[in-house]
C-alpha cells in the first residue's frame, strides 16, 4: 500500500508541476513588468527543480510519471489565450496564475489526503509543491 500510494502521489505531483510550468510558459512572454517577469522566471526554475526531484524519485520506483491531463491543459491554454487577447496586461496574467495556483493547491491537498499511506519523502515533495503554488498566488496579488 505504501509503495502504491507513493507512486500515485508522485504521479499527481508530476502532472501538477508540469501543468504549472506550462502555465507559466504560456504567460511569460506577455508580462509587461520586469519584476513580474523576473518572479515568473524564478518560479519556473523552482518548478523545474521540483520536477527533476519528482522524476528522480519516480524512476527509483521504475515509474515514468504522468503527463498533465490533456483536456485540462488544452482548456487552460484556450482560457489563457482568450483572456490575454481581450486584455494583455499584468493584471490578467496575475488573475490567470492565481486561478491556476488555487486549483493546483486544492488538487494537491486532495491527493495528499487520498494517498495518506505514501512515504514521507513523497508527502514532503507534495507539500513543497503546494507551498510553491501558494507563494506564486501570494506574489500575484500585487498585480491584481
Image: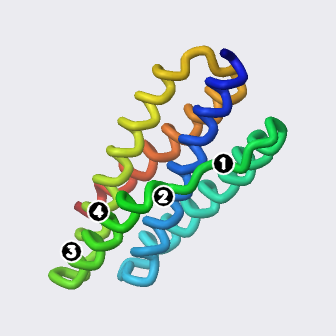
Please say if 81 is above or below 100. Answer: below
Residue 26 lies in what quarter of the image?
A: bottom left
* Position of residue 98 in the picture relative to residue 66 (left or right): left
Total numbered labels placed on residues in the image: 4
Residue beneath disc 3: 83
Q: Nearer the viewer, mark 1 or mark 3?
A: 1
Determine the residue positioned at 40% across, 74% down. Answer: 27
Q: Are marks 4 and 2 in contact (CB under 8 Å)?
A: no
Residue beneath disc 1: 65
Q: Nearer the viewer, mark 1 or mark 2?
A: 1
Q: Nearer the viewer, residue 15 or 128?
A: 15
Q: Mark 1 or mark 4, which is nearer the start of the sequence?
A: 1
Residue 82 lies in what quarter of the image?
A: bottom left
Question: Which numbered dot is residue 96?
Answer: 4
Determine the residue positioned at 45% across, 76% down. Answer: 28
Q: Are marks 4 and 1 in contact (CB under 8 Å)?
A: no
Q: Are marks 3 and 4 in contact (CB under 8 Å)?
A: yes
| Circle 1: element type | loop
Q: Nearer the viewer, mark 2 or mark 3?
A: 2
Determine the residue positioned at 74% across, 41% down. Answer: 58
Rendered location of residue 17, percent (x, y): 55, 52
Q: Nearer the viewer, mark 4 or mark 1?
A: 1
Q: Residues within 10 Å of mark 4 (few under 14, many from 20)?
A: many
Residue beneath disc 2: 19
Separation of marks 2 and 3 at Cα, in angstroms: 18 Å
Separation of marks 1 and 2 at Cα, in angstroms: 13 Å
Amino acid at each position: 500500500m505504501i509503495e502504491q500510494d507513493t507512486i500515485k502521489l508522485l504521479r499527481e505531483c508530476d502532472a501538477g508541476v508540469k501543468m504549472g510550468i506550462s502555465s507559466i510558459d504560456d504567460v511569460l512572454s506577455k508580462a509587461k513588468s520586469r519584476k513580474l517577469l523576473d518572479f515568473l522566471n524564478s518560479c519556473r526554475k523552482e518548478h523545474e527543480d521540483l520536477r527533476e526531484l519528482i522524476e528522480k524519485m519516480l524512476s527509483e520506483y521504475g515509474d515514468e510519471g504522468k503527463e498533465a491531463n490533456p483536456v485540462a491543459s488544452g482548456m487552460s491554454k484556450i482560457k489563457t489565450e482568450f483572456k490575454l487577447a481581450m486584455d494583455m496586461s499584468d493584471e490578467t496574467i496575475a488573475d490567470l496564475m492565481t486561478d491556476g495556483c488555487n486549483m493546483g493547491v486544492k488538487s494537491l491537498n486532495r491527493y495528499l489526503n487520498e494517498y495518506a499511506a505514501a512515504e514521507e519523502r513523497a508527502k514532503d515533495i507534495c507539500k513543497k509543491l503546494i507551498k510553491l503554488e501558494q507563494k506564486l498566488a501570494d506574489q500575484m496579488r500585487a498585480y491584481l
